[in-house]
Amino acid sequence: MAALADTAALPPPRRRADSHRGLVFVLLAPVLAFFVVFNTIPLLWLLGLSFHSFSLTSGQPPEFVGFRNYVQLWMGRNNFWGDLQRTFTFVGVGVTIQTLLGVGLGLLFWGSRTMPGRRLALTLLFAPMVLTPVATGTFFRFIYDPNFGALNQILLGLGLPMVDFLGNPRTAFWAVLAVDCWMWTPFMILMTLAALGSVPRAELEAAEIDRLPFRKRFTLVILHHGKFILMLGILLRTIDSFKTLDLIIPMTKGGPGQQTRLVAVELNKQAFESFNMGFSSAYAVYLLLVSIAMTSIFIFVLNLRRRRG
Amino acid sequence: MTRSIIRPAKPGLVLPRRRLLQGAAAFGAATLGAPFVNRLQAQEAHPLAGQSIQMSILGIAGWLPSSLGVQMSPLFADYAKEQYGYDVSFTFAEAPFADLFQKAATSLATRSQEYNIIISDSQWLGALAQPGWIVQLNDIIAQNPELDIEWYSDIVVDTYMRYPDGSDQLWGLPQEGDTIALFLRQDMLDDPAEQEAFQAAHGMPLPRTFEDYENLTMAEFEKVAAHFNRPDQNLYGTAMQYSRVYDFVSCYLYPFMWSQGGDIWNPETGEVVGILNSDINARAMEQMRDWLRYQPPGATNFGIAEIIDVFTQGRVFSSFQWAAVGLSMITPELEGKVLVAPPPKHGEGEAARRVYTMGGQPWVLNAYNDDAHMRVAIDFLKWWYKPETALEFARRGGNPADAATLNDPGFDAINPWNRAYKYMLTEGRSRDFWHHPKYAEMLAVQQEGFSAFMTGQSDDAMGVLDYIACAQQQILADVGDAPEVPSMCYGTSL
Amino acid sequence: MSWRRSLYHTLLWAVALLWFAPVAWIILSAFKTREDILATPPKLIFTPTLQNFVDLFNRNTSFTTQFLNSIVLSVTSVVIAVAVSFLAAYAFSRFKPRGTNFLMFLLLSVRMLPGPAVILPIFLMYAAFGWKDSHVALVLFYAMFSIPFSVWILKGFLDGVSIRYDETGRVNGGSWAHVIFRVVLPQVKPGLIAAFIFNLIFVWNEFLFNFVIGGVRTQNIPYALAVGTYSDGGLNWTFIAALTTIYLVPPVLAIYAFQKYLLVGMTFGTVRGEV
């Protein structure tokens, strides 16, 4: 468990980039080329298009409409606020559950160094993270199926009523969220183990000698040292879960009604089912703003940690 | 066969596509002479004779008629070799219903020849035709009398070929005709104990034959469904589609609306508000939701495949299902045990009517096909509508739509569902919905709305209809095809 | 003490197995017939069959193409991405050119954007230039998508390598190429492996981009899973189970073999160490 926090506490002394301008340029050129072609140009394109009305299936060229798309979205066309609200609920509740479960199980796995077959056990535990989301979604639809699915058979065996997990509007959202938690709790376990690894052994031993109760040991020692890594974990989950799409498409397609329509699902529908390119571009720009905000918070926390050493 | 196309080429560098085709044809005829003489009929040499062409078809994944077209294509390769003297091989791409338009459109938008022939859904005709992605077929039909076919009814032309509605522009040709049918377990109906029990309970005999169901109303069928609805034995009365995916719930809700006199829009003016949100339609939604009580758990997520699963696994006594998947519905174990009948009428007595939703798909041709591929595509279509091919298609479980095949006295006996299919393909009993280019967007709105109502998120049918009608008219108004939405719309939400 | 330890280990194993149960269920299903899959109550004991795997190869004519595409697309794009990212990360780490922080930020924000928002303008661009359904164009896009993670991971590692190595190398008359590839590169091998493996897993599992800007020639296995959900006889559970089972083997082997890089890989280098 020799996890160590970021080792880049001391950045190398600043060198004048100017004296090696040619070299720097050569080194950066490929990435910059990629970036300009596949990022800058497309993003400018997106931005431009967001001020146009452009439907791919209309056969008409784009028509400039100013801020109409933005205003329509802001006014709640296509229930934009509903999508955002659902997404934030999905993110908030999901990440909270994953963090609590992950920290709990992470603490449980803390002393597992000498466990026989530890590597295999951890591989099994972490497997959900690397499964193809499309396959996961499809198969969970089967596991949730009221007629043939394993889960309802288990409920039935326990004498509980049958639940139409994905068809019932009261359960669909939570059923999807549960799968997300199943997939990503292992990630928070991983982060917890890393956080625990960053706690200096001496302090832990001191706490042991002082006979601090576990709750105090946890808040005073473990959280004190591990909070940055946990924070990064939570942020990464927040950002990733904001993007959830692959999982939802095979399970519910955003239904029943709009119950599982997260922003990525709706944007995918607007862009690649309805081919409303102008409207979708405005939608994407709004999401870009959210992403930039979240990335900024992430970097802020990262720098905070650097500064603290 | 090729007479109408081969004309002398005119000089010029920039030639329209058809010109080029003619040019190529004339060139082929002149240089190659007649290397291949058909044993059965003397004919001019095909311009592609001796060449090898690879064709690509985009079809619908998990959709039987589409895969039949795929499976039968080697027959065309043999035919083309024999008849025209060229080699053709096929590659296939597939996407499920919900994603096929996405697949086709993303490709066609790049002016790609990735798919030479596409099995489109009927409602996409507008969205494919409007940007000029597919070929308008009027001239091709005029030049190829083999494609000027007498269809079984006008619904075929209206559904699979015509866009805009009411115009004379033709854009597709039926790959497969399809209607909703009622699949019933004949073995359960034939059980004398069931018949007695039903007679005793309802004072009427258990409807058991095609003719019985032809005259049956939904109210009467409800008794039958209720009779066989036995959740404790894991058997349910019936199954319909309620899924939010693609057009599933819409296709099975429309019959409740149309049969009772409801409508969905005014195709001339583009108005939806005031037409879709009618009392009849609101009641229709409630009726369809009430039918959930005779259906297995999870029915609110039922689409085509889920119904096949519950029916073939013996969980339901009956199912409303597309005739197209008859072959999948009637597995070898169920052979001889299934009656396929017209779905019941709505309403009472003399006024009772049935207007169900059309299914089925047209073939459409990629407008960016080069001449050779276009030529092969047309040859392929000509082959597809040959009486022998149509018959073979039917024998393998497909549903042709031409009058000659359907009127053949032997047709009804080919498949158990043929009679019901033909019955429903008759004028006035089935209809299609919008072919407007904004189809996908309008559909998504109402699928969400209908699904919200069917799953009980909303109990206010009229409120849901108001929301859908306003959103749909707004979509049409945005492209200038409908008047601005009335002020009542500014408070509607789902 | 020892029985408590055994109990503890049993508990840990139970948690791991519980978490793995749904995956195990998929794998079990791959060896069942359609009837066994749909049987209620679910069958734990059944006669295993390999028929589903045989069918994969026989019935699904595109299977080989899709599988090869999965491999080619992921390996090529990630190799390219890691190579160019290493160079850029070296420049960022050693020379700190103006705008480094801003560029690092921009790079990251690309990865923070929901998929459809990323692919929408790319699709329009590909449509305009006719790049859709081309291996090269798809590889380049996937490479672009793998660059941010790789740069972040590698910069973190390079920052940790003392600049004295570079200086010594230069003083001894080594060329820049010698210093970068012979002196520094071997020291960040863990970073290279982490960047490689975790971008590989991402591209391996990627569906949306392949669906939108790929096509007949470039379709991968996630695409096949998405479009093969339905067969003519209903939902195609045997196909999904068998294909998923085959497909999950490489990533699961990867996290077994490269477990010590897991943390670095999943946090793009911002947290380092092993678990």
Image (cartoon, helix red, strand yellow):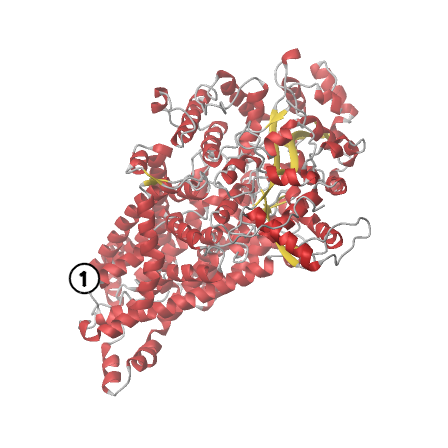
Q: Label 1: how many residues lie within 10 Å, few (<14), some (14-19) or many (20+)?
A: few
Q: Which of B196 and B88 is in front in this view?
A: B88
Residue at horizontal 69%, vertical 49%? B71
Q: What element carries label 1?
A: helix
Q: Return the residue at label 1.
A: A308
Residue B431 position by quadrant: top right
Q: Is residue A96 left or right of residue B110?
A: left
Residue lying farthest bottom? C172
Q: Where is residue B415 in the image (x, y as percent from the top left)?
A: 75, 36
**For the C terminus of chain A, which image quadrant?**
bottom left
Q: In this view, does B138 lie to the left or right of A130?
A: right
Nearest the eye: B452 or B371? B371
Residue C164: give x, y in percent of width and height: 23, 80
- Is residue B68 something that shows in the picture? yes
The front one of A213 and A78 is A78
Name the residue rendered at 21%, 72% in the picture: A12
Across the whole image, how many numbered discs are drawn on residues? 1
Compared to residue C192, the image places residue B349 above or below, namely above
Under mark 1, the amino acid is Arg
Q: Which residue occupies the extreme right position in the image?
A: B39
- Residue B445: give x, y in percent of width and height: 45, 32
Residue B182 coordinates in the image, percent (x, y): 67, 29
Residue A274: image quadrant is top left
Relative horizontal placement of residue C21, taking residue B82 as reference (left or right): left
| Residue A160 is at least partly visible in this image | no
Q: Quadrant of the N terminus of chain A?
A: bottom left
